[in-house]
Image (cartoon, grey):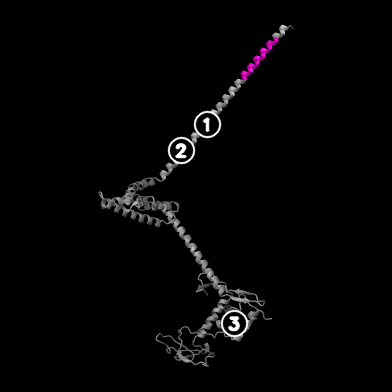
Amino acid sequence: MSYRSEKAEIARLDKESEARRAREDREQRFEQRLELARLQLASTRQDKAEAKADRKETQERWGARFTAVRTWAGAHIVDLLIYPLMVFSAAIAVPSAAHWGAAHLGETGALLPILSEWGMVAFSIAVHVSRVRTPDRPVWALQTGTWVFAAIGFVIAVLRGATTPEGGGWDLGFVMGLVSIAGVAAHQLVSAAPRRSPAEQAMQKLARQELAEQKAELATRKVAAARVEKARRAAIAHAVAEIDTDGTARLVFAPGRYRLRRGKLHPAAVAGLPVDPAADGEIGGTVADEAAAYLAGLRFRRLADPGGQQTTPSGEGEGPGGVATLDPTQAGGTAAIADEGDTDGSGEPGTGRAVPARRKPAGRRSARATIPEPKRRTFEELTAEFDAAVANPPAGFDPTNAESIRRTLKCGKAPATKLRNQFIADRPTGGSD
């Protein structure tokens, strides 16, 4: 290959290389412009989205504010109608009160509206706030303050109108007084004391009743707790100390139902409460013995055996009612009643006295008229039975309780008390070895 041809080839290759570089540069610049356009478009879109979001947020915020204002205005439509009355009333009364006070009371008299106008307004607003925040709290004191300061403002306004040099008089004073208290009066009638629906009144009444019931229950619990504490103290004060042989001491209480009177416990029976079941035959035997002892203690005539009794013959010994008598001595006569201690009916050692004979219907003559002699035991026999019960105590037997001894031995209260005292006196005490 010749020199020229090589030079031409080199020139061609250089042109192709330059053309390729120029094309690559154009493509690179195009890509850069395209990427820049893409970035600008994304930034513009983002700015538009952010601006739209800001506008939407602003609209929502203003919409929420408008909704809140509209809701509040709908809920306080009455307040929006009443409070302007207070504002207009104050706008008319305050300047004239300040001018009149400065003219008649000096420089400090310009503060007269604080007493004559602001006092009743402050109490009126306080009533409303108290009703809203604490509905259960009474507001009678605040209402009293409202009407007291309203009366003060009314009197001051009447005096201002009556003493005005130009066109003044009592008619002007009365008008100024009404203007002074008109706003507060309207506020008290509507806003400070709102009317409640029947359902709200019923709910409020129910709430008051529940509160009263809770207070009554609390008071009842306090009284019951106080009575229980008093009963415990009385029981401790009247408890018996039981001391063992080793010197150990404990308080012994008598269980049962008691009534507390003047700090002391008195046994009491409560109707309708269940009682402890008694042993078989205990109640019947006890009642029979007590009835027999009671009848034996009375000064009734003891009748002789049925075989020795004689009935009054027909027509003899009858009273006006035609009732025959039963007499162990003689028909139509009298019988002697044995005194206490007369066991054989002979009158010894007691002295008899004559009493009319007992009457009995003629158709029922039986031996049931005889009262049997009750079972009598000497104190030595009761002591023997008591010692046997102490040695082998039955269920529920307590030798230190007179009532338990009386029920177990079926005896009187006096011997039961004597047996208990004797047992306590003979029982060994602690510390004696």
Name the secondary structure under disc 2.
helix
Whole-angstrom CA distance, mark 1 to mark 2, is 20 Å
Instruction: Give percent across and percent down for residue 328.
Output: 49, 90
Foreground mark, 1 or 3? 1
Query: Which residue lies at the image location 43% right of the left edge and 44% below the top edge?
Result: 72
Residue range in magenta is: 9-27
- First-in-chain label (3 vs 2): 2
Three-letter amino acid code of the residue under disc 2: Trp
Name the secondary structure under disc 3.
helix
Measured along the vertical axis of the image, is residue 319 above or below residue 92? below
Task: For the C terminus, give its image quadrant.
Answer: bottom right
Mark number for residue 146? Answer: none
42 and 104: which is toward the camera: 104
Name the secondary structure under disc 1.
helix
Instruction: Give percent across and percent down for residue 103.
Output: 31, 51
Whole-angstrom CA distance, mark 3 to mark 2, is 98 Å
Q: Is residue 3 left or right of residue 343?
A: right
In the rendered image, which residue does mark 3 sit on?
421
Q: Is residue 17 magenta?
A: yes
In the rendered image, which residue does mark 1 sit on?
49
- First-in-chain label (1 vs 2): 1
- Does the rendering let one see residue 193? no
Mark 1 crowd level (few <14, some 14–19, many ≥20, 10 Å Cα): few
Toward the front, the furthest residue is 107
In the rendered image, which residue does mark 2 sit on?
62
151 and 288: which is toward the camera: 151
Q: Is residue 296 magenta?
A: no
Please identify the dominant SS of the magenta region: helix
